[in-house]
């Protein structure tokens, strides 16, 4: 696979997978009134962003530099998604979805 394809495809797939995980785990937390299910989406986000970063690094040249800063650049978006996932994973159970489980 070409490096350019991995650079364009990995962040977009990771973003959509993370949004899907947030939506599904948020829906699960609302229907069960348990905020622990929402915190699990943070783990899924971290896993997806780590896999996408590894996939990009595999297809990237050994020198990974940001030539132009863009929202969908893998070195900008994937660490930001991992940080967001870590915050949700750590503090997602504090979001009130009803009674505690």
Image (tube, rainbow, N blue to C red):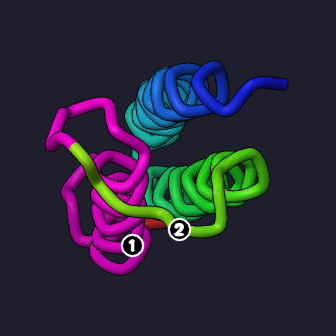
The image shows residue 45 at horizontal and vertical percentages of 52, 51
The vertical placement of 99 against 68, above or below, is: below
Magenta span contains residue 13: no
Give the residue at x 20% y 56%.
96
Residue at the farthest right position: 1
Question: Tag 2: Cα neighbours inside 10 Å, few (<14), some, or many (≥20)?
Answer: few
Indicate the quadrant where residue 17 lies: top right
The residue at which mark 1 appears reads as 86
The vertical placement of 99 against 9, above or below, is: below
Give the residue at x 31% y 68%.
83
What separation in Å lies between label 1 and label 2 (alpha carbons)? 27 Å
The vertical placement of 100 against 21, above or below, is: below
Residue at the farthest bottom position: 90
Could you tell which of marks 1 and 2 lies nearer the N-terminus?
2
Q: Secondary structure at mark 1?
A: helix
The vertical placement of 82 against 11, above or below, is: below
The residue at which mark 2 appears reads as 63
Question: Tag 1: Cα neighbours inside 10 Å, few (<14), some, or many (≥20)?
Answer: some
The image shows residue 80 at horizontal and vertical percentages of 28, 57
The image shows residue 82 at horizontal and vertical percentages of 42, 63
Q: Which residues are magenta?
A: 68-97
């Amino acid at each position: 696979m070409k490096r350019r394809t991995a650079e364009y495809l990995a962040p977009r797939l990771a973003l959509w997978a993370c949004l899907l995980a947030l939506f599904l785990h948020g829906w699960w937390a609302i229907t069960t009134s348990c905020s622990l299910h929402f915190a699990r989406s943070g783990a899924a986000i971290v896993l997806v962003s780590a896999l996408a970063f590894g996939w990009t690094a595999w297809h990237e040249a050994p020198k990974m530099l940001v030539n132009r800063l863009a929202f969908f650049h893998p070195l900008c978006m994937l660490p930001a998604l991992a940080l967001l996932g870590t915050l949700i994973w750590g503090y997602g159970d504090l979001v009130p979805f009803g009674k505690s489980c």
